Structure formats: C-alpha cells, structure tokens
C-alpha cells in the first residue's frame, strides 16, 4: 500500500501520541501498522522501531526483542547513527539484546555479546558484572562432576548414620566412636567438595571477566598513546 506524506505524518503522530508507559499499546500499534511505519523517513522509522523494541522487552517478548535489536544494530551501522536521545545507541542495543538472551536462558549467547561489548567498553562495571552473572549460570562439566561427587559422599554419610544407628549401637558398641568419625568425615568431605567446586567456579568467572577487561583497556591505551 502506498502512503501519502499526509498519511505518513498522521501515522507517526498517532504513534507518538501513545503513552510511553503503555508498552502493550505501543506493541499493538506498531505490529498493526508496521507496513506504513516502514514508509516513514529514516529518523521517524528508527524512532518508532526503537520504541517498539524497548516495549517488547518491557512486555517480556524477549525473542522478538532479540530480532529487533539485530535489525536496529544493522541500521545503526549502515546509517552511522552514533547517539539517540543523547544515548550511545549501539551500546544500549547490545546490552538490551544480551539482557533478552539472558531472560531466555541463552547464557552462552548472552555472554558472547557481553564479551564483544566489554572489548569496546571495558570500563562499564555493569557489563562486567552482567558477564560474570552469565558465566556463573553456565555449568561446566567439571562442576557437574564435583556436585555429583558431593552428593555421593552425602549419601554415603547417610548410609553410615543408618549403619551406626541400627547395627553398631545395638550390636557393636565398641565401634561406635569409629562409626561416628566415619560418618562425620563423609559429611564433612561432601560439604568441602561442594564448597570447593562452587568457589572455584566463582574464581574462574571473576578471573575471566577481569582478564578480558584488562586486555581491552590495554589495547585501547595502546591505540590512544602517541607513537614514540
């Protein structure tokens, strides 16, 4: 359908008349009149599409938000848009996409985007913490094995307590202290193995984020420092 200039102006005006907090209304309007919105001027279309993208996130439509973030990132690059409403729009869209992927439990994809983001903005503390969160949500095989070992030791401790109660105490009282030591050792080992695995995971994630950020800062300093 061909839209005349007056029709495009009316369409844009009606879109902007929607209350900014009415995210569901924004989503409904954009999806109903998307063909017409695509005929708007570049700035007007980007304004509508960005507002729609933000509304998708606020209404929990994270899959659609990821698709729109990719579309807008392409426009930002091709149209050389550096800021929008005084905000670094490229950075904002990257973080929004990472947040949507995180909500979709796609932690590896979210972490990948955040790594690329930190390479550009290494001093962003929020992004570093966000990446750390994504990394901790990913459970490597060694951590699963550690947890399985801890659970096995805990079951052995329970079995040792049962033997102590129903066998050692009634029939082998002389071995009571040894059985007590055995189940305490097994229980303590289970707690130690579990705690050690979780602490190692935390340390590895923090180290990975810190190493990435430091390397990115060093590269930026090398680029900005005058050649000797």
Image: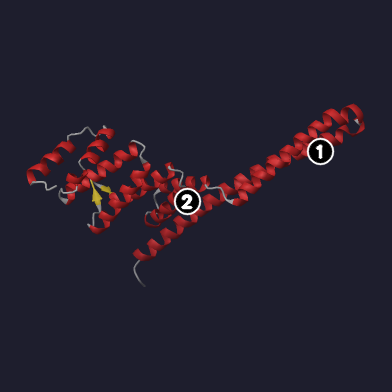
Residue that numbered label 2 is attached to: 108
Q: Nearer the viewer, residue 105 or 127?
A: 105
Q: Quadrant of the C terminus?
A: bottom left
Residue that numbered label 1 is attached to: 182
* Residue 185: percent from left, percent from top: 77, 39
Q: In the displayed structure, does residue 202 sit left or right of residue 125?
A: right
Residue at x 10%, y 42% (from the top left corner): 7
* Residue 38: percent from left, percent from top: 19, 48
Residue at x 37%, y 44% (from the top left corner): 63
Q: SS for tag 1?
A: helix
In the rendered view, tell whether residue 37 sits above or below residue 78. above
Residue at x 34%, y 44% (from the top left corner): 64
Q: Quadrant of residue 9?
A: top left
Residue at x 24%, y 46% (from the top left corner): 86
Q: SS for tag 2?
A: helix
Separation (CA) of disc 2 from disc 1? 41 Å
Q: Nearer the viewer, residue 194 or 147?
A: 147
- As drawn, the residue found furthest toward the front would be 1
Q: Quadrant of residue 188?
A: top right
* Residue 61: percent from left, percent from top: 35, 39
* Residue 29: percent from left, percent from top: 22, 37
Q: In the displayed structure, does residue 195 sit left or right of residue 12?
A: right
């Amino acid at each position: 359908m061909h839209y005349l200039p007056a029709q495009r102006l009316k369409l844009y005006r009606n879109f902007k008349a929607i209350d900014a907090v009415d995210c569901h209304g924004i989503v409904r309007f954009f999806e109903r009149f998307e063909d017409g919105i695509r005929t708007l001027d570049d700035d007007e279309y980007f304004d509508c599409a960005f507002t729609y993208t933000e509304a998708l996130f606020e209404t929990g439509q994270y899959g659609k938000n990821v698709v729109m973030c990719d579309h807008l990132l392409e426009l930002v690059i091709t149209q050389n848009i550096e800021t929008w409403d005084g905000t670094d729009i490229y950075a904002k869209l990257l973080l929004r996409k990472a947040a949507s992927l995180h909500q979709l439990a796609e932690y590896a994809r979210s972490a990948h985007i955040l790594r690329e983001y930190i390479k550009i903005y290494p001093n962003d503390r929020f992004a570093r913490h966000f990446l750390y969160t994504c990394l901790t949500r990913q459970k490597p095989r060694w951590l699963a094995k550690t947890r399985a070992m801890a659970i096995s030791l805990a079951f052995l401790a329970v079995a040792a307590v049962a033997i102590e109660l129903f066998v050692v105490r009634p029939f082998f009282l002389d071995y009571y202290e040894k059985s007590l030591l055995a189940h305490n050792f097994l229980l303590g080992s289970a707690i130690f193995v579990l705690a050690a695995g979780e602490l190692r995971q935390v340390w590895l994630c923090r180290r990975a984020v810190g190493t990435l950020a430091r390397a990115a800062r060093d590269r930026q300093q090398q680029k900005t420092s005058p050649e000797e």
